[in-house]
Amino acid sequence: MEYARLDHWLWAVRIYKTRGDAGSACRGSAVRLNGQIAKPSAKVRIGDTITARNKSYIRTLEVKALLEQRVGAARVPDYADDQTPESEYEKVREQRANARLLRHKGCGRPTKKERRDIEKLLK
């Protein structure tokens, strides 16, 4: 195999959940191949660098091997070398922690304390 389609490869190494998501990300300029905005049909070769924006962080990967079939999560390091800086992962951890702490009042289901306060007001 000389090359693989970019959207197939991104899906196969589990960067995006579906091939459609990978294609949409490419069309939406969220994926760069060797620093250039890439189409879903771009040819990926061994040694290429792929930068993919996924929700709130940016992953940087180097292609180690080509494939078109999806592989298990344990086998992904055989095909992609993750070069994402630790700061990106730290940013994600921080956002998740803040999401749990910061909840807007009246947004979503009431907490136990809010429910008790509402019951006190209704009595």
Image (cartoon, helix red, strand yellow):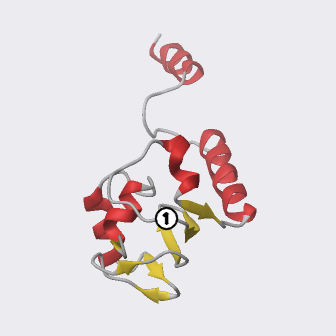
Query: On the picture, is 41 further left or further right than 102?
Result: left
Residue at 67 percent across and 63 percent down: it is: 88
Q: Amino acid at mark 1?
A: Ala
The spot of residue 86 in percent (x, y) is 74, 61
**110 up-or-down from 4: above or below:** above
Local packing at callout 1 (Cα closer than 10 Å; few below 14, some 14-19, many 20+) is some
Asked if residue 75 shows in the view, the reply is yes
Asked if residue 104 shows in the view, the reply is no
The spot of residue 82 in percent (x, y) is 62, 62
Residue placed under numbered mark 1 in the picture = 65
Query: On the picture, is 108 further left or further right than 7?
Result: right
Q: Secondary structure at mark 1?
A: loop
Residue at 44 percent across and 52 percent down: it is: 14
Q: Residue furthest top?
A: 123
Query: On the picture, is 73 further left or further right than 3?
Result: right
14 and 5: which one is in front?
Answer: 5
44 and 25: which one is in front?
Answer: 44
Query: On the picture, is 103 further left or further right than 22?
Result: right
The spot of residue 16 in percent (x, y) is 40, 56
Residue at 61 percent across and 63 percent down: it is: 81
